[in-house]
Amino acid sequence: MTKAHPKKFHIKSFGCQMNVYDGERMSELLVDQGMSPAAPDEDADMVVLNTCHIREKAVDKVYSDIGRLRRKDGTSPMIAVAGCVAQAEGKEISRRAPSVDIVVGPQAYHRLPELMETAKAGKKALDTDMPAASKFDILPSRGKQARPNAFLTVQEGCDKFCTYCVVPYTRGAEISRPWADLVDEARALVDGGACEITLLGQNVNAWSGEDDKGRMQGLDGLIRALDKIPDVKRIRYMTSHPNDMTEGLIAAHGEVDKLMPFLHLPVQSGSDRILKAMNRSHSAQSYLDILEKMRAVRPDVALSGDFIVGFPGESDQDFEETLQIVREANYSQAFSFKYSPRPGTPAAVMEEQIAPEVMNERLQRLQALLNEQQYAFNRQTVGRTTDILLERKGKLEGQLIGKTPWLQSVHIISPDLNIGDLVEVEITQAGPNSLTGQIKERMAA
Ligand code: SAM
Ligand code: SF4
């Protein structure tokens, strides 16, 4: 059955910030095709589910969301499944969920307009190619930004093949986007109203490329170039891999004021035995050595990380070593997950898979420790004066929520300020997950 050309679209992104970035680029592409985003309570005639394949639960969520898209009269909007589930499951998606019209992988979404034509003709459209030509050359250029804190993907894919992870299979080989394209895109983002730029990559600190004078640069060189754009006020980057944490990047933290004192550096486990089985190619000690160097140049740096509990073969002793590295490293925030076996990865077929109840108990203990550290970090900021970038409205009348340089959320009440303002506040209260602040000038009055 043929379908009408969709006019209103809705994009729902799951998972990491790179998916949020891809979702924004798809949205710009659809607007370029004459479509417009549906309001939250409006019925869209095209829905893009921009999916994540990193853990089994994320995949299950996609299928339940597809089911919920069926309207009361039995019809469905045009449904596109994009992202890593699309890449990993391909045709299988339309078999399990026949209402899906389009399946498009993370390297092929610039072809959405052609795929929509196929779907309109009543045929299933599938594109999970990893074409040699970059999607970034074809996508429309960046326009007005919805948020003051913009994402900019600088690096994609991964060659590290940690034994638990699907990313090298779903996102493909590691590529760095060219210097000139990134500087241009950063300029377009600030011209569009952003003032904070977060550089993104699965291993963002593996970025390398030639600058405008033909010299090889690492991520620190790119950060220094963005620092020179006057309207860029804050620079962040994530996610970093310990093996790509260069001396130059560490030094930049001590020298570039716009580079925020925040480091997301996952260690996954504190046990060298488990790190080896994960193919992480760093040790617990080499990770701690990086932190020591970082804190020597930027003593107030806030540390974030990722952890996996219950990797196959993880003993009580291995888990104790994870708790130990958390105590030594001291995190301001962190993400922790139960190991989820992913089809096609080496760890999925390893012996000694850990029982769910053991994983649950370990995750609870780890999260209790991480939450304690986060709350302690938040309490330390009380009484401090700092700048915050106002990013969104809060639930209360006149309430705005901004972020400190250390990526903590701060709630303020100020009907005269706007999203995108960078203001100085005094932190007056700390909760486990957020802070309360008062505008400096107003306090003095
Ligand atoms: N490249 C980054 C690194 O090496 O740290 C991380 C990228 S990955 C998209 C984000 C996080 O998901 C990982 O750091 C890891 O903690 C978690 N993760 C990946 N595969 C997982 C799995 N099979 N089970 C549970 N957590 C997983
Ligand atoms: Fe996945 Fe490891 Fe690559 Fe990170 S470094 S994306 S965890 S394979």
Image (cartoon, rainbow, N blue to C red):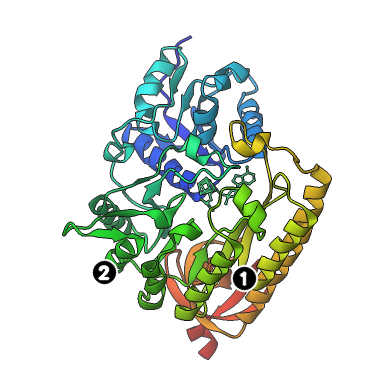
Q: Amino acid at mark 2?
A: Lys
In the image as oriented, which residue stretches furthest toward the bottom?
444
Which residue bears the numbered disc 1? 329
Image x and y of residue 332, in percent: 61, 69
Q: Is residue 406 above or below residue 145?
A: below
Instruction: Return the residue nearer the eye: 284 or 342.
Output: 284
Instruction: Return the residue nearer the eye: 412 or 326.
Output: 326
Judge whether residue 400 can be spotted in this image: no
Image x and y of residue 372, in percent: 72, 70
Alpha carbon separation for disc pair 1 and 2: 32 Å
In the image as oriented, which residue stretches furthest toward the left?
213
Q: Going from the N terminus, do you reach mark 1 or mark 2 first?
A: 2
Classify residue 438 as left or right of residue 107. right
| Mark 1 CB near ligand 1 (8 Å cut) | no
Classify residue 402 as left or right of residue 334. left
Residue depicted at 54% across the width and 65% down the height: 286
